[in-house]
Image (cartoon, rainbow, N blue to C red):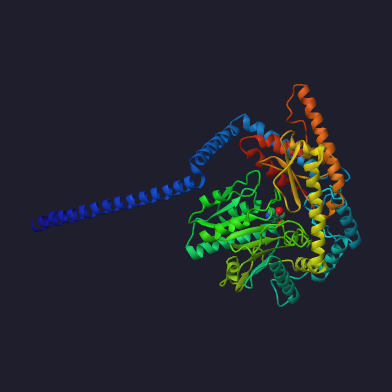
């Protein structure tokens, strides 16, 4: 029996100990569950409080309503029957796009494989000439808003020579191409001086405004992470800021808060920004000027906010580029925008816009070297060697740096002041005509008070997209805008000589649209949809739907069509 008596005892012992342990475990799980729940509650109530403080009760309710409405509408779009209908229409639109963008027919030779033997140089040359000459909207005659920031034929020839000398150059190898390193550093130094950077100011060149903006956002995100441990970064931008900021938000997982830029100033609303700032905010943004309306945000007020809350402030001068620094010297009104405003920590400036450098060239500038180093990428353990690069690209085109340097040296300060004169002067002519000439000022209304090269206008009386399509019919390519519906002209040097024609054609088109709308009303039809053009289709019809799913699908098709050989 000893064995059997010992056994139950020890079993009981084990049982008792086990039940204590089990209870402890249950207790622990309970505590942990409570803590997790508490943290969860804390996290969500913090989010809710931030949302309420940032947008207010009504703003929050409106956004809940819109997102519910959109979700339901999207479910409807996916309902059987509806979905097929939508798909069919999108497929039709895609075929339309293909017809417009991809040449086809018996005369068109498509090259889908390498030629077995290389072509003779002359054959390549004549084919290139034919490609350059394909039927297009005539930017050469000043018919295209923005897009072609041309500095004149002579400058183009000089750029081509610069390319020739540096075709193989790559700044990733400064020992092999010391001249390119020197030119890149000098381009950055010259732009820093244009924007009145302090002694410690620093910058890099990039492939374009988008990359410059991506880098500034990345630097701000990395700074907040390293200095403050921010893991859920947020940035606050005007809703008129360039799409590149949204791209940065998507690429780098930074939550983006959009703030309205309301009439009559169309500048970003400062108190709204102030309410949205919280401990996760890594960057504030202002434009000088913005793309849609050419309006400069109140950089001084943004700077005050940035300094008070100790947050970096980026000013997007991609479009302002080499116009805004010269406004004053050219005798025009200006507003504060550069490093002289104390809260400004970074600036993007496109050399490939009004700097007249070849496309693929921009700069991002920082108040000090430390801010710049937050955008660097360095990996010491790569089997390929210690690797360090300043921005997104690895290898970079030295030829573009040479082209940019040559453009800046050949144009010089006086050249840019002259260009500023011509370009801003032409923009003012267009603005004045719209404000003052009776054929235009009844129906068209200028947005805000533009100081630079962009003139945006809307209408309270006629369909502005019909005006855009009417202008397209006359060979112009103006830019359609949305929220509010409007169009703009970004004046470039080629447009300067065409501005009188532009104003005349605008008068004819406005009269035309009025005539058509009167006729439609007389026939008891809707004024909307009288135009059949692209702007009306995209922004009038598709844009009026409650969700942008259809527009997104159309845009996807558009990108697909670009790669159809
Ligand atoms: C053009 C532009 C940019 C940058 O555009 P990229 O096409 O990437 O050079 C950024 N901001 C504004 C306001 C612009 O007009």
Q: Residue at x 45, y 46 (%)?
A: 48
Q: Position of residue 294 (x, y in %)?
A: 71, 51
Q: Position of residue 514 (x, y in %)?
A: 79, 31
Quadrant housing the N terminus: bottom left
Q: Quadrant of residue 370?
A: bottom right
Q: Position of residue 67 (x, y in %)?
A: 54, 39
Q: Nearer the viewer, residue 265 or 382?
A: 265
Q: Position of residue 467 (x, y in %)?
A: 78, 38
Res. 475 visible in picture: no
Q: Quadrant of residue 264?
A: top right
Q: Nearer the viewer, residue 101 or 346?
A: 346
Query: How many circles with numbers are drawn on the protein?
Result: 0
Residue furthest toward the bottom?
175
Q: Would residue 371 be found to the left or right of residue 331 on screen?
A: left
Q: Quadrant of residue 289?
A: bottom right
Q: Nearer the viewer, residue 57 or 334?
A: 334
Q: Does 514 sit above or below residue 491?
A: above
Residue furthest toward the left?
1
Q: Would residue 368 be found to the left or right of residue 162 on screen?
A: left
Q: Does 500 sit above or below residue 219?
A: above
Ligand number 1: quarter of image: bottom right
Res. 4 visible in picture: yes
């Amino acid at each position: 029996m000893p064995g059997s008596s010992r056994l139950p005892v020890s079993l009981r012992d084990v049982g008792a100990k086990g039940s204590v342990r089990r209870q402890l475990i249950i207790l622990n799980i309970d505590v942990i569950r409570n803590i997790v729940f508490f943290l969860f509650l804390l996290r969500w109530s913090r989010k809710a409080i931030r949302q309420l403080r940032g947008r207010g009760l009504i703003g929050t309710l409106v956004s809940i309503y819109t997102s519910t409405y959109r979700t339901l509408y999207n479910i409807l779009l996916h309902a059987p029957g509806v979905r097929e209908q939508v798909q069919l229409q999108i497929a039709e639109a895609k075929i339309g796009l293909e017809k417009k963008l991809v040449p086809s027919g018996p005369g068109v030779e498509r090259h889908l494989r390498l030629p077995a033997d290389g072509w003779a140089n002359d054959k390549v040359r004549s084919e290139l000439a034919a490609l350059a000459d394909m039927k297009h909207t005539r930017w050469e005659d000043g018919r295209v808003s923005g897009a072609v920031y041309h500095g004149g034929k002579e400058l183009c020839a000089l750029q081509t020579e610069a390319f020739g000398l540096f075709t193989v150059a790559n700044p990733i190898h400064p020992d092999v191409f010391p001249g390119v390193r020197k030119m890149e550093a000098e381009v950055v130094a010259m732009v820093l001086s244009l924007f009145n950077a302090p002694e410690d100011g620093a910058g890099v060149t990039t492939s374009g405004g988008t990359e410059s903006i991506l880098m500034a956002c990345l630097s701000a995100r990395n700074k907040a992470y390293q200095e403050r441990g921010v893991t859920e970064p947020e940035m606050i931008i005007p809703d008129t800021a360039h799409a590149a900021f949204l791209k940065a938000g998507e690429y780098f997982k930074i939550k983006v808060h959009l703030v309205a830029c309301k009439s009559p100033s169309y500048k970003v609303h400062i108190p709204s920004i102030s309410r949205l700032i919280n401990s996760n905010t890594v960057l504030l943004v202002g434009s000088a000027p913005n793309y849609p309306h050419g309006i400069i945000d109140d950089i001084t007020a943004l700077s005050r906010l940035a300094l008070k809350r100790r947050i970096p402030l980026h000013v997007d001068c991609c479009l302002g580029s080499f116009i805004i620094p010269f406004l004053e010297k050219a005798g025009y009104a200006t507003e504060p925008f550069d490093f002289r405003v104390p809260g400004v920590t970074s600036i993007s400036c496109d050399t490939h816009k009004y700097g007249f450098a070849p496309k693929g060239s921009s700069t991002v500038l920082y108040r000090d070297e430390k801010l710049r180093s937050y955008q660097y990428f360095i990996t010491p353990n790569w089997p390929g060697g210690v690797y360090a690069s300043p921005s997104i690209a690895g290898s970079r085109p030295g030829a573009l740096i040479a082209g940019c340097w040559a453009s800046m040296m050949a144009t010089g300060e006086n050249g840019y002041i002259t260009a500023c004169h011509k370009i801003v002067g032409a923009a003012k002519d267009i603005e004045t005509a719209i404000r003052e000439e009776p054929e235009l000022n009844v129906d068209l209304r200028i947005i805000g008070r533009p100081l630079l090269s962009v003139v945006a206008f809307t209408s309270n009386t006629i369909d502005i997209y019909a005006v855009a399509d009417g202008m397209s019919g006359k060979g112009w390519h103006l830019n359609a805008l949305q929220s509010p519906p409007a169009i703009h002209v970004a004046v470039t040097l080629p447009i300067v000589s065409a501005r009188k024609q532009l104003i005349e054609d605008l008068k004819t088109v406005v009269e035309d649209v009025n005539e058509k709308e009167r006729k439609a009303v007389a026939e008891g039809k809707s004024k909307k949809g009288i135009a059949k053009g692209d702007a009306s289709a995209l922004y009038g019809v598709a844009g009026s739907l409650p969700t942008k799913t259809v527009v997104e699908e159309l845009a996807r098709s558009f990108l697909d069509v670009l790669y159809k050989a």
